[in-house]
Image: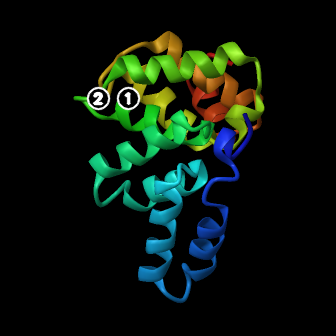
Amino acid sequence: MGLFGKNKDKGEEDLALGISLLETNEEAALQALHRACDKGNAEAQYRMGSYYEDTNPGLALGYYEDSYDNGCQRAGFRLARMNILDKNGDEEIAISILADAFESGDDSLFEGSLDAMYDMGVSLFYGNGCLADAAIGTELLERGADLGHVPSLAFLKERGIR
């Protein structure tokens, strides 16, 4: 579906306005981004999820879910990561998102999310989140290493996997 997904044209003007105002008027920028979100703009929803991820994880999850549902794969990786890293996360959502990405055979889906893949891979490898699955963790780290992610490659080498 691409970076912006199937709802690319929805809320584009508000998205552009919000992005242009981020440096000078955060309140107006957020209002414009909220309008774009209300129109189903996947990129705006992704950006709002990123904005709230550290301060309001519950709200961030909602934005990421909407963005992913509207075709933004990057939001899916953020959504999966938040669920995997949280002891109370929803492992079914996370595994479903990752399975869809792996089954697609499209490495471009991973390229913008290598750090998130690394976080998920290490967490799964050690069982630090809602799910312990070293095989899936290793698969994520292998894919990251194949795409040139140095920390993933280093992790695998340090453990004698590569």
- The single residue placed furthest to the bottom in the displayed view is 24
Q: Is residue 67 visible?
A: yes
Q: Answer yes or no: do the residues labelled 2 and 1 have beta carbons within 8 Å?
A: yes
Point out the image quarter for the C terminus: top right
- What residue is pinned by disc 2? 89
- What residue is pinned by disc 1? 84
**Is residue 5 rendered to the left or right of residue 59?**
right
Q: Earlier in the sequence, mark 2 or mark 1?
A: 1
Q: Is residue 22 above or below residue 87?
A: below
Q: Is residue 109 above or below residue 19?
A: above
Measured as percent of width and height from the top left, residue 12 is found at: 66, 62
Within 10 Å of the Cα at label 2, are there few (<14), some (14-19), or many (20+) other Cα atoms?
Answer: some
Front one among 133 and 18: 18
Measured as percent of width and height from the top left, residue 68 is found at: 53, 37
Residue depicted at x 53% and y 49% = 40
**Is residue 136 rendered to the left or right of residue 2?**
left
Point out the image quarter for the N terminus: top right
Residue 108 position by quadrant = top right
Within 10 Å of the Cα at label 1, are there few (<14), some (14-19), or many (20+) other Cα atoms?
Answer: many
